[in-house]
Image (cartoon, grey):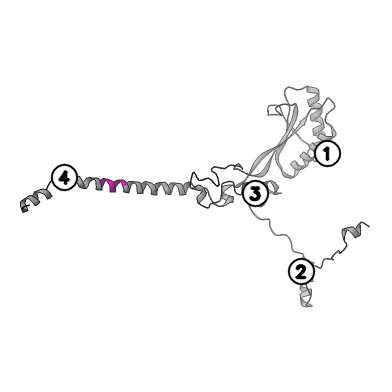
């Protein structure tokens, strides 16, 4: 083949057509790579936190506390419900805020309602709550005639719902079980029990101030150290066995 023929082949339009698929393939690979990066970034932002305290936080807020006092007859309330009202009123005095309200049922005999309300007011006054407000438009028990006592109280609770399993822990359908990350429900029951058992919800927010020191105990400890003695408290040890104590 002559030199002129070689030059004509190199300048042929088919040479440009052969290079286009390679350029298209490179463009597709670059787009897929960029798409994968964007999707991975979105997945990282959407992942749940590993710390169970952030995944199932305990929230403090005002919640309503209620007690339904059922109408059992025209003679007021019985001993069982009287004890319930007394305990409810004592808790209101310690932790409640705002007024103590009694919501009256609308579809009930007026004599029974008034006698039950009178007994509730008598028990409340005997336990340090002289005034009980009356409400005739609020909600009561849905299926039985009852006077509903309610007030607002500071309480702590977990906002998330326990028992949620978005994916199977040992499932192979997705790669979520391969990431070695805490599962979604981890810590939910622990946080719920902690919120239910805490005596004062404010303890979850801040520590209590230190109390006064025991001056006598401190002076005694210092004196024991000066005398080269153990300053700790010496508790007597009872070596009596249970079977010996029962004889």
Residue 80, picture quadrant: top right
Gap in angstroms between the C-alphas marked 2 and 3? 38 Å
Badge 2: few (under 14), some or many (20 or more) residues near its Cα, within 10 Å? few
Of tags 2 and 3, the one toward the viewer is 3
Label 2, secondary structure: give it.
Answer: helix
Residue position marked by numbered label 1 in the rendering: 126
Of tags 3 and 1, the one toward the viewer is 3
Residue position marked by numbered label 2 in the rendering: 218
Is 25 included in the stretch rendered in magenta? yes
Q: Residue at x 67, y 52 (%)?
A: 203
Q: Residue at x 78, y 42 (%)?
A: 90
Q: Residue at x 45, y 47 (%)?
A: 43
Badge 3: few (under 14), some or many (20 or more) residues near its Cα, within 10 Å? some
How far across and down, in percent of the image, does residue 14 sit?
16, 45
Gap in angstroms between the C-alphas marked 2 and 4? 100 Å
Residue position marked by numbered label 4 in the rendering: 14
Quarter in which the C terminus is drawn: bottom right
């Amino acid at each position: 083949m002559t030199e002129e023929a070689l030059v004509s082949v190199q300048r042929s339009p088919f040479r440009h057509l052969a290079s286009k698929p390679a350029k298209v393939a490179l463009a597709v690979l670059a787009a897929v790579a960029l798409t994968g990066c964007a999707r991975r970034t979105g997945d990282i932002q959407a992942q749940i936190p590993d710390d169970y305290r952030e995944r199932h936080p305990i929230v403090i807020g005002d919640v309503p506390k209620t007690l339904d006092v059922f109408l059992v007859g025209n003679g007021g309330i019985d001993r069982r419900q009287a004890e319930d009202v007394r305990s409810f009123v004592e808790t209101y005095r310690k932790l409640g805020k705002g007024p103590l309200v009694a919501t009256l049922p609308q579809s009930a005999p007026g004599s029974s309602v008034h006698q039950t309300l009178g007994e509730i007011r008598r028990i409340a006054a005997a336990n340090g709550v002289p005034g009980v407000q009356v409400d005739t438009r609020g909600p009561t028990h849905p299926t039985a005639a009852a006077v509903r006592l309610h007030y607002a109280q500071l309480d702590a609770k977990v906002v998330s719902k326990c028992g949620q399993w978005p994916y199977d822990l040992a499932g192979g359908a997705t790669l979520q079980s391969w990431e070695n990350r805490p599962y979604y429900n981890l810590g939910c029951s622990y946080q719920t029990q902690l919120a239910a058992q805490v005596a004062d919800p404010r303890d979850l927010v801040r520590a209590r101030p230190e109390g006064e020191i025991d001056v006598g105990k401190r002076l005694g400890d210092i004196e024991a150290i000066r005398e080269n003695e153990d300053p700790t408290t010496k508790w007597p040890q009872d070596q009596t066995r249970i079977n010996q104590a029962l004889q």
